[in-house]
Amino acid sequence: MNIAQTKEFILTHPDFRECISSQTVLDALPAMHADFPADMPQRLVEALQAGGIRQLYTHQYTAWETAQKGRDLVVVTPTASGKSLTYLLPIFKRKLENPHSRALLLFPTKALSQDQQASINLFNDRLKADAKIYTYDGDTPGTVRRKIMAAGDFVVTNPDMLHAGILPHHTNWIKLFENLDYVVIDELHTYRGVFGSHVANVIRRLLRICEFYGSRPQFLCCSATIGNPAEHASALTSRDCRLIDENGAPRGSRHILFYNPPVVNKALGVRVSAIKEAARLGALLIQNQISVIFFCRSRVRVELLFSYLRERCPLQKDRIRAYRGGYLPGERRKIEAELREGQILAVVSTNALELGVDIGMLDASVTVGYPGSISSLLQQFGRAGRRQSDALSILMATSDATDQYLAHHPEYFLHRNPEQAVLNTDNLLIVGDHIKCAAFELPFRADEQFGSFTATGEMLQYLTENGVLYHAEDRYHWMSDVYPANQLHLRQGSRENVVIIDITEKGREQTIGELDIFAVPTELHTDAIYIHQGQQYYVEELLWEDLQARVRRINVDYFTDAQDKVEVSILSDEERGHRGGFGLYQGELMLRTRAVMFKKLKLHTHENLGWGDIHLPELEMHSEGAWILLPTEHPLNQRFSAAEVGGMLAGAAQLLGRVAPLVILCDPRDIRARSEVKSASFHAPVIYFYDAVPGGIGLSYKLLQNLPVIAGVALSRLQECSCEAGCPACVGVPDADMNIKTAAAAYLAALSENHG
């Protein structure tokens, strides 16, 4: 079957047609071409022609013109639109003109770095430029590193390695920094939130070192679709970047379906598991030779769906793969190569394959659960139907309140602009750490400003008073024996990973993967079932201090799902007024998280088979938050009993936390909500919202500013839910003794736009 036939089959098949809540077709678009620029060297033209390119796309032509004028730029076009040429052509032209020219190319992941180096090498071979192109990351051997420092023309790396491996050792990279003409930043949209705020400060340090060596590199940036690309590029690079967003690449027609699994219990609002429905629908695609990529929101869901698909498609099971973080690099590279070569018919992935790694031509994409942002959903949809071929993209809704809102309001995705990427480059915790790193790299002048951070002088004085720096001869010098960049991790969580060791065969222990330490308490605790490429492993022992999990292959009919508990302590608070009789506050919080228990869930049916305790240390995080206080005299306290107030708060917090990202345009993983019937700080019922990232980036404050709108969306979702008294799709776990739905609706109505 082709794509059109497949879609028609789904729309008419009795097992599927009632589940389609929306269908849309995005028409095919022709290519818009431009002739090769008159100032493009003939060698570049011949290299392009050797690769089958007879004309440029219009956005590639505009990027060339902009780069030749010395302007910093950001190109925003869809997946597979030839963005890499927008930076390869300028940097190779400069290399042909000046043999000493250097370029630094930043990609957010090691996988993408390796993938892009292959493309750059291919163009270099066609051009016969003999440029020395190297990838410099954590996997680069020491002997090769020294060669790159001395002779690397184009250095391909990631922000983490630039931060900890290049900038602190800039004296070993003099040739690079003295001759640095271009800095390429690809996948710009991934640098948001805390990670993006760190990377912006790494760029500040980079420019500071370039100034010391007398260079001023030009930025060539590329991004997927976001709401504020030019603003975001400028915030990240400290430069005014010209936006190029008129796509000249062709596009095949895209058929988009919103799929809402059937309700199995209307009173409780329970729907068939989205994973099980994805397996049922996915098997139809695979058995009809439709190549497909599935995206899931967690590692566990990836492994479950992978297992279910292999069971349903025994004839094709050897052409189905799982792909996620935690697999060893060699295993991931092998899967990527098999995808490019067409050996794999289906792959189940986390968002790890959402970025621009070349995975060849795919016919369809199935996203199981809204990934948290429109830009992510567009990226995932864009992984199928590359170039001019038609594509089928399906959003499979879960019972989550956000998914159900989208299932009932598909226009939100279809007609809404993508999210704005948010940075807080001057977050005191972040900028303070990077000023330490910068001082280690080069002493600060007394009058020097770190990027646009206006309080640089105060921060330098503070660090001096605390014995980190010393002030002498109009300079602030680093004075500690500690290597600061090595203590600072750019991404959420810890620099440390826990190694997963298979001990099934005595005397033949082998490492099968690794996991960041913040995910370990809920995924690798003792007695957990860890799934790797469909194979189940029983965690016999978690050696927390040794950063090891020792696992044994096993075959059981269940998987585990852990729960954690968060304790909130208020460090500082600021009253932000009242609404609907509630008190509104914001401030700094201390969060203490501990994994407390796990459930055993039966495969396929997901019924609860039992539970167990988890005994691991708690993890602490300082962040920003906002909270809504329910005063004793509030009418809701008179209308509902104390028990009902608890259910009301829990249900309202569930809904507000789930729909808030739709309004404040952030990743759902970056903001959380929880309720307390009797807060330790207030001795009164309260709902907290907090940024789930160290230091916070102001998302909770933004939520408070948009609270009436968020409450209105939450109330709409609650009223549209088909349940009677509350269910997992709206207020969370229902209570047989009370109508949580009615209580939560009263709470949200008091907060919404029409009440004040």
Image: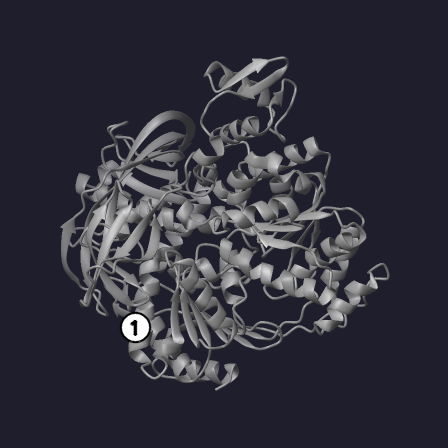
Quarter-of-image position of residue 633: top left
Q: Is residue 297 left or right of residue 149?
A: left
Q: Which residue is mark 1?
A: 308
Q: Residue furthest front?
A: 143
Q: Is residue 241 left or right of residue 166?
A: right
Q: Which color mode does the image show?
A: one colour
For the C terminus, the quadrant is top left
Please, what secondary structure does the residue beneath circle 1 have? Answer: helix
Q: Position of residue 498 (x, y in %)?
A: 32, 48
Q: Position of residue 269 (x, y in %)?
A: 27, 63
Q: Amino acid at mark 1?
A: Tyr
Total labels: the figure holds 1
Q: Residue furthest right?
A: 38
Residue 559 at least partly seen: no
Quarter-of-image position of residue 245: bottom right
Residue 681 at least partly seen: yes
Write the residue at 69% across / 74% down: 30
Q: Position of residue 439 (x, y in %)?
A: 56, 26
Decide which of 695, 728 is in the foreground and name it. Answer: 695
Q: Is residue 583 left or right of residue 637?
A: right
Badge 1, how many Cα within 10 Å: few under 14, some, many 20+? many
Q: Position of residue 415 (x, y in %)?
A: 56, 61
Q: Is residue 61 left or right of residue 600?
A: right
497 in relation to 351, above or below: above
486 in relation to 311, above or below: above
Write the residue at 18% across / 68% down: 557
28 in relation to 522, above or below: below
Write the residue at 40% across / 80% down: 286
